[in-house]
Amino acid sequence: MDALVDDLRGLAEVVVMPTSDVSWAFSSVMPPLTQVYGGASRVYPVDHDWVSAPRTAPLRFAYSVRERDRVTDQILSDAMAAAVSAGLYTPRASVASRPAVDGTVVGLFGSRAMVRLDDGSMATLWEELSGFDVPLERLVRNGQRVRGRIDPATRRLDLEPPDECVPASTRPRYRAGVAVLAEVAAVDDAALTLRLQPGTEVVTTAGSVTANELDRLTALFTVGDVVVARVTDSEPVIQLSLLDVDDDEATMQAPALLDGGPPWLVAPAAPQLSAPADDALPSPAPDAALGFPPAESVDAELQSEAGPVPQAPSAPGGPTPRDVRAGIAVRPAVRAPDEPVPAPSPADRGAVRDLSLALSAEQSRSAELRRRLDLALGASHELTELRRHAEHLERELDSVEASLRAFREKYRRTDVRRQQLERAAKATTGSTDIDDSDPREWFGDPVDALRLSVTQAWARRVPAGEKPRWPLGDWKVGDRFADSLDNLGPVSWRKLAEVVADVVVADPARLSALENHELRVTESGGAPAVARKDGAVCYRVALQRNSPSARRLHYWRRGDLVELSRVVLHDDTAP
């Protein structure tokens, strides 16, 4: 609570409510599924969207003390995001009285980053207050230099506006034919809104997303998904397509949002279906871990309220009975065996009657308290079981959502593969469309077949309006190239032709997507490039990625002339 109060001062009102008649009264007047009680926490934004959509104000619950820090961070994140959304905190409007500072990121901890300022002091960068709607790990990285304004009281660092941080020279230019990474910003059954970078969004219709008319985009994508798309046109506006994008497509690196930062998007990993959640419920948590006193203490508390529990009269020679009302010990007098029993006086009979009535009253009160104790303990155990069940359902929901994302990604990849197989089937049944076929059977020399395929790839991938700017220049093959084609493995002939076309055209954006770089004489980053006596330099591009023994293409470049050297495996670094 101290952390919440300190970090949210001036941004959010923190209310602590006991689980009691107060929480019952609160729950009775709140809309369904928006209540909070029993150790849970929830942030209520200023707007009222959460009334009809409770999941926009998620319930945060710690099932044990071990989860306290995690839940505290979640609540801080929820509250900060709500404050920014409500305009209560605007990082871009940092007052001039806050000094401008420079520093270096020295650590990332979830949604927080520690920054060592140049004066040696420390500051904290908050994901929710960064001014960018992206996870912090996609904004900054260790060792990165940042600039902003420091709040001396909280030591929070507000970054400078992005227009002042990102040089215009680093902003990418998207050219037709290049594969790029994009984030799904919005989705409905008619179109996807894809974000190439904050401020650059492209609406892509369903026909450019899937070839199956029965597909529903809302069933295939969710906001936040990262997809690979191809730029089909860049002038006058960018257009994207998700059709015919290979699984191992080389993509143009996403831009960094801050100078020196990481790419703001990374390629999606191959789908991994998660194992089903364990049906076994977790072991019950101790009452104390859930915020309940132990059963013994509840018993003792109720007994304290009721007073000592009356004891039944004992057998002769056993413990003496007690007057439960006055707490005075009552001990019978000792008499001789032959002594006559005196008749009780009226006063004695009255005292016995009063004592009997008092004992009966105390026994009734004790029974009522015992009943209340049983109800309280029963409710405590029932709530413990409900919390165990809620924890199990929460884990199960996370597993189902992860599996759903994996199935969506797997379906999209399978659909791309289906399109490829359909084109191959058309080619084998005599179709006149030869763009996707392998023409090696039509030529005695595979190099001649490659020349045809490269020309087709260039014609297909470079728009008509850009062909004068990006012509297919001269290229040739080295003595060892034809033999190295045996190393293609799973790389398709079409993919080889497309990569060669991109190498010959030498469009920097396309080469960047292929991980094009000079081949160096050693693995050291400062080592000189491999060069021939005629001045040609050896380069290396990716034919395949994210797979064992990924294929690479080595080629020589001297001026505008390209000479293909060899198709090699990833670990083969000879020219």
Image (spheres, rainbow, N blue to C red):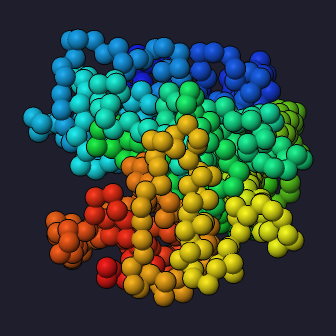
Left or right: residue 26 versus residue 361 is: left
Please state the horizontal and vertical placement of residue 136, each as a whole percent of the image: 41, 41
Left or right: residue 361 versus residue 88 is: right
Q: Is residue 391 above or below residue 103?
A: below
Viewer-proximal residue among 442 and 555: 442
Please state the horizontal and vertical placement of residue 398, each as a whole percent of the image: 68, 53
Residue, x 42% and y 17% (percent of image)? 89
Viewer-proximal residue among 113 and 453: 453
Residue, x 55% and y 63% (percent of image)? 454
Residue 419 occupies which quadrant of the picture? Answer: bottom right
Please state the horizontal and vertical placement of residue 490, each as a whole percent of the image: 61, 78
Quarter of the image where the C terminus is located: bottom left
Quarter of the image where the N terminus is located: top left
Residue, x 55% and y 43% (percent of image)? 176
Q: For the view shown, which residue lies furthest in the top direction?
A: 96
Residue 519 occupies which quadrant of the picture? Answer: bottom left
Left or right: residue 116 versus residue 467 is: left
Can residue 4 be seen in the rendering of this structure? no
Viewer-proximal residue among 402 and 53: 402
Residue 349 occupies which quadrant of the picture? Answer: top right
Can residue 255 be seen in the rendering of this structure? yes
